[in-house]
Amino acid sequence: MASYQALRHVSIGQYIPTGSLIHRLDPRTKLVCFGLLLACTVIVSSYIGSLAILLVITGATLIARLPLGYLFRSIRPALPFIIVLSLLQLLFFHSAAAAPDARVLWHRGIVTITTASVQAVVVALIRFAGLLMLTSLLTNTTTTGDLTHGIEHLLRPLTRVGLPGHELALVCTIALRFVPILGEQAEAILLAQASRTITPQREGAWRLIDSATRGARLVVPLFVDAYRRSEELVLAMQARCYHGGRGRTQLRALHLSRRDLVALALAIIILIGAILSGYVALP
Amino acid sequence: MYDERGIRRVVNAGLLLAITLLLALTRIGFIPAPTPAGNATIAHIPAIVGGLLEGPLVGLIVGLGFGFASFTQATVPMFRDPLVSILPRLFIGVTSAYTYLALRKATKDQLRGLLALLLALLLFAAWRIYATPSDDGSRSLLVPVLIVVLGLALVGGLYLWLSRQDPRIVVVAIAAAVGSLTNTILVLTMASLLGYLAPGVALGIAITHGIPEVIIAAIIVIAVVAALRGLGQRKRSRVSEDAF
Amino acid sequence: MAEPLIAITALRHAYLPGTPMRTDALKEVDFRLHEGEIVALVGPSGAGKSTLAHHMNALLRPEMTGHVRVLGQDTASRTCDVRLLRRQVGLVFQHPHQQMLEQLVGDDIAHGPAQLGLEGTALRERVREAMDAVGLPFAQYVDRQTFALSGGEMRRVALAGVLALRPRVLVMDEATTGLDPAGKAQVLDVVRRLHAELGLGIVIISNDMDEVAGIADRVTVLFEGRTVAAGPTHEILGPDLALSDYGLLRPTAGQIVDRLADRGLDLDRSAVTLAEAEEAVWQAIRP
């Protein structure tokens, strides 16, 4: 019950200021590098390749002085699931079409373990660890304000090809600003509705309907409140003669420094390496 | 973007994205349901509502937000793969939007025709599955029978419901169902294509998890749209003078 | 003296303890509500009034120090029948749209009694009775959409929903904030009538001292999470207590007699309502 107050403090990633090199990078650099390295993790499927990417990401995380323990503790509750799912994947799923030249290691009944399925599972786990750290690298080293700034700048060139870059960044800004506000609303709604709950939950088949109605009861006032706010915001924007993104100036301008160029260059090199590794038969 | 409609779309997209983040990142986005996981997500609902009320572009953006939030919260390797958690989610709002746009002006008869077509398709699919023996020569009976039974129940139920209901509500329900199914089907398809789940397991999850989620999504989206657009599904309170 | 309906002693409450976002909403609070009383809970914003109200129907339970005893039950105890308390203590929230559970007014008010098993004509009559009590004509409002109502109307629907459960205690959190003068008067009228006809114990949370002066028997002042004063209305809103220390002012009537007294007029400064002030000034200036 007392956790009602937690909803207004929700965030994608807690900003952990450690003053590292990575923290001082331009948010655009971080966003682009995030995208490039994300692509890398998706592209590579060899042992060496994925380990290499993991090494790079781990290195960056250490440079950023982010607490690795804290990161991996967050997935501890899910550890049983991870183990079970990986086991299932290992034992039961082998697609003969995908890896025709894989060596069969063990076969009995419906259980087939091949070198390909072992590789798939191990690479998936390596990739998972890498992505955990990579997301942390982005969200824990950059404040949400900087992130949206960066997104807006990056999306700006899109306006020249007719896509609404500035508007997309505005959508992000509005969303992030309203999350705590709507979170407070949700807290209050939960509390007020709990106040009107006077009988215990029904059992059996009714539980599905009951759950849905309870979900609706929470969500509907939230949507109504959000739409009310949107009407106000639209009026406010019109009142201030908002006319789109062209020619807008920023209070805080972003500058690229040498650090950023180095980071970008590294990321691009790694990506090229990842793509090339696909052509070389690596273990 | 300089006109009111453009501003409205931006602002609504932002607010729907905010609700999505709130639902995807906290416990209120999961409600207890009779599924293998014990929970069903409702964080995809703002994407569906966005697609329905604001159009496919807004639906796409909110869906992307849902995907990204789901990606950052993922605790199993399967969902940490952006191709599984982000890519499919782009389409939730888009499919809902186009379904709604296509059916919006439909009359009751047209919808009935659509239901009949759906039933015919399901029966055909069931027959094909039965008629095609699998690799070792056996014919599966369970799956076709299941499809026929569920299909009849579904179409029959919708038919009855349609006859005493404003067709617009039914259209909203169908669009919501399409959106939720898009989520379930595309995510599980990607998961099995990429080798995380065996196709049989994926299908099983699709049915046991997907169907309750669809029902919940339909109920909630109807309630939201009714509250926002005044599409009162019932005009009379249960304690009204002529209610009984 | 009969046991109080609500007895809160030395209550402490913190939100999100153990996190960097901890807020100590209540530090040391005492509160009493006796049978048939109207008690006003006043204090500046952020003093913890709503938090205290949430303890009164067991939405929040004492997790640190302090005791909360409501209608004979200890809310911290495991055997406390929380659902019963929610029925017997009707809490009306500050923003009524957060309390709405249904699309239609009639359905929302019927929600509570229906959960108790009422149906058919009995249910309808209970809803009608509640709507009459708050001044919403049944035929006109029963089929209206809840989310389309005005603030004042929604507030009355919320109150009706609570009254339909026939509570023994009513707690109204800022029930008149944001209403126009006519709306405020209407709500206060309803409260007075309920008090007179049903003898309910009522807690009114308000910052409007004039309103408080006109309706409350006793006043409890909350400041920064502590009970700093409690007593009969005339004592608390009278000239002797330095309300400004707590960010509050005397009711307008009290301020007028204070100002006139400061200018040298010899008059009774204990007035808190308009009528009392009128009498005090009249007595002082008539030849």
Image (cartoon, coloured by chain):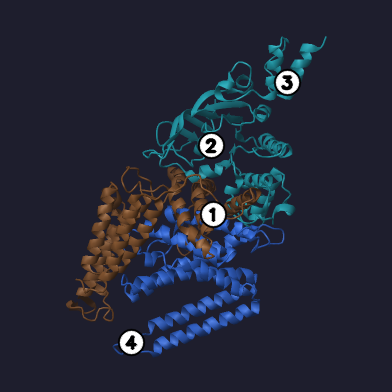
- Disc 2 crowd, CA 10 A, few/some/many (<14, 14-19, 20+): some
Res B98 label: none
Q: Chain of mark 2?
A: C
* Front-lying residue, C174 or A96: A96
- From the top left corner, tell me how far across and down residue B88 is, in percent: 43, 68
Q: Circle 2 sits on which residue? A: C50
Residue type (three-letter) at the residue carrying disc 1: Leu
Helix, strand or loop at label 4? It is: loop
Mark pair 2, 3: CA separation: 31 Å
Which mark lies nearer to you, 1 or 2?
Answer: 1
- Disc 3 or disc 1, which is closer to the eye? 1
Q: CA distance from mark 4 to mark 1?
A: 49 Å
Q: Nearer the viewer, residue A264 or A77?
A: A264
Q: Colour of chain A?
A: brown
Q: Are marks 4 and 2 in contact (CB under 8 Å)?
A: no
Mark 1 highlights which residue? B15
CB of mark 3 within 8 Å of CB of mark 1? no
Are the numbered discs 4 and 1 placed on the same chain, yes or no?
Answer: yes
CB atoms of marks 4 and 3 within 8 Å: no
Color used for chain C? cyan
Q: Which residue is mark 3?
A: C276
Residue count near mark 1 (Cα–Cα under 10 Å), binned few <14, some 14–19, many ≥20:
many
Query: Residue sitting at 32 percent across and 54 percent down?
Result: A263
